[in-house]
């Protein structure tokens, strides 16, 4: 079971102080939070992708590469990579490069995003969102698994004999999760390829999450990738905790009431009752999180959103310290009763092992100037 955190990178005014962090401060805070996540023993840090104010989550590969250079163990992921508006050629190159830089500590989550205007900004039609997600991902898989790609589709110019570089580390592409809140087509896509399915699990009731996860599991089995219980499932979640539950509710209420997404809507009490948001003591967070298995089954990845709604960095780091205190019990709880037939979350090492070992798949293209694949001799002559 992988346990971690994700950020959407919002730049939000702290409703208790009236202070708004600068973009620079928020970017640096993201790095500090990721490093803290590794310090307390979490498995995953993931960042979303947004290209509009008030977010600083554009260019996730730069962010993850910078964090990767300052960490050693934590898996770096996205939440999400915009497969609809980002060219799959660019995704193939960027995340293969990130694989090499982090020695394989990378996977990614494909998604359509939740900001409508981003489509025309990148020359796409939002009405084609699902079709873009399907076509672009099909191309991305080929770019990672085939050294020379001839391709033609509806939404970008054709490719002829194209080689994406660098090739995936050890001959194995990053593991892919498909993230969705409400689209059964995305659950179907994840099942078709045998990839992971990640349900956002933040705004919707448990009954909706149960329905989406069940659909994915059933279709995973239908496509012959294994039994339904062997499907690779991830869930999101939110919490705010203090040693005393009343203190947690009192402190978090102004942030909840003014949050960009759900602020000025349902009460905190209604929202915590009907969604996975948990505000209370560490024991309450632990028990609520472990209860997710009651409707999602045994799953592989749990990510929490902890740095949103204007919470200051100091408070977020305190939340991670509290999470670290209950982390051993959370791991033990998830392991309890877990059948041996339920697979672990995929990692680069497990994917390489499943492929029969590491392979060097570097492509040395023919030099069109000299007709040779090795320019060492020419270089020596020029230097002489």
Image: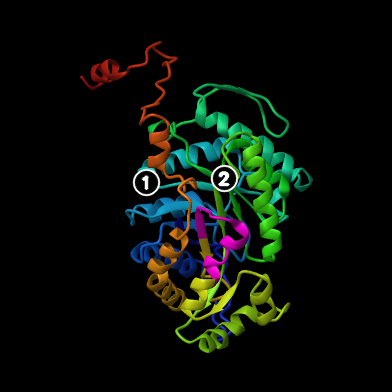
Instruction: Kindly identify which numbered label has been placed on residue 102.
Output: 1
Q: Is residue 58 above or below residue 231?
A: below
CA distance for labels 1 and 2 = 27 Å
Relative horizontal placement of residue 351, taking residue 293 as reference (left or right): left
Residue 95, position as x, y percentages in the image: 48, 42
Residue 380 falls within the magenta-colored stretch: no
Give the residue drawn at x 58%, y 38%.
194
The residue tagged 2 is: 231
Q: Helix or strand or loop: what does disc 1 sit on?
A: loop
Which residue of the protein is positioned furthest toward the top in this rendering?
A: 371
Callout 1 touching callout 2 (CB < 8 Å):
no
Q: Is residue 339 above or below residue 88?
A: below
Relative horizontal placement of residue 379, taking residue 364 as reference (left or right): left
In the rendered image, which quarter is residue 211 located in? bottom right
Write down the region rendered in magenta. Answer: 288-302
Residue placed most toward the observer, 281 or 249 = 281
Q: Earlier in the sequence, mark 1 or mark 2?
A: 1
């Amino acid at each position: 079971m992988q346990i971690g955190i994700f950020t959407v990178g919002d730049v939000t005014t702290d409703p208790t102080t009236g202070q708004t962090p600068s973009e620079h401060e928020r970017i640096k805070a993201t790095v500090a939070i990721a490093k803290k996540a590794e310090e307390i023993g979490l498995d995953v840090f993931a960042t979303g992708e947004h290209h509009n104010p008030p977010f600083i989550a554009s260019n996730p590969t730069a962010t993850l590469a910078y964090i990767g250079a300052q960490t050693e163990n934590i898996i770096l992921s996205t939440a999400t990579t915009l497969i609809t508006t980002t060219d799959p050629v660019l995704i193939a190159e960027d995340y293969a490069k990130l694989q090499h830089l982090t020695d394989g500590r990378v996977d990614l989550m494909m998604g359509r995003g939740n900001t409508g205007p981003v489509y025309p900004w990148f020359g796409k039609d939002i009405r084609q969102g699902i079709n873009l997600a399907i076509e672009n991902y099909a191309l991305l898989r080929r770019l990672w698994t085939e050294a020379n790609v001839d391709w033609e589709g509806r939404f970008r110019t054709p490719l002829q004999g194209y080689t994406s570089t660098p090739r995936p580390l050890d001959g194995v592409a990053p593991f892919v999760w498909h993230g969705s809140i409400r689209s059964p087509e995305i659950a179907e896509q994840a099942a078709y390829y045998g990839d992971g399915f990640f349900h956002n699990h933040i705004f919707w009731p448990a009954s909706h999450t149960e329905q989406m996860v069940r659909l994915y599991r059933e279709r995973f089995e239908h496509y012959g990738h294994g039994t339904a219980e062997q499907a690779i499932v991830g869930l999101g979640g939110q919490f705010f905790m203090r040693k005393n539950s009343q203190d947690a509710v009192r402190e978090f209420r102004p942030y909840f009431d003014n949050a960009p997404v759900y602020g000025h809507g349902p009460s905190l009490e209604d929202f915590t009752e009907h969604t996975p948001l948990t505000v209370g003591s560490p024991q309450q967070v632990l028990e609520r999180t472990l209860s997710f298995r009651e409707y999602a089954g045994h799953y592989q990845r749990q990510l929490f959103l902890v740095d949103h709604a204007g919470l200051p960095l100091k408070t977020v780091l305190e939340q991670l310290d509290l999470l670290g205190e209950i982390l051993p019990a959370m791991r033990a709880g998830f392991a309890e009763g877990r059948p041996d037939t339920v697979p672990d979350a995929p990692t680069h090492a497990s994917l390489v092992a499943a492929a029969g070992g590491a392979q060097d798949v570097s492509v040395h293209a023919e030099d069109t100037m000299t007709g040779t694949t090795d320019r060492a001799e020419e270089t020596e002559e020029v230097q002489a």
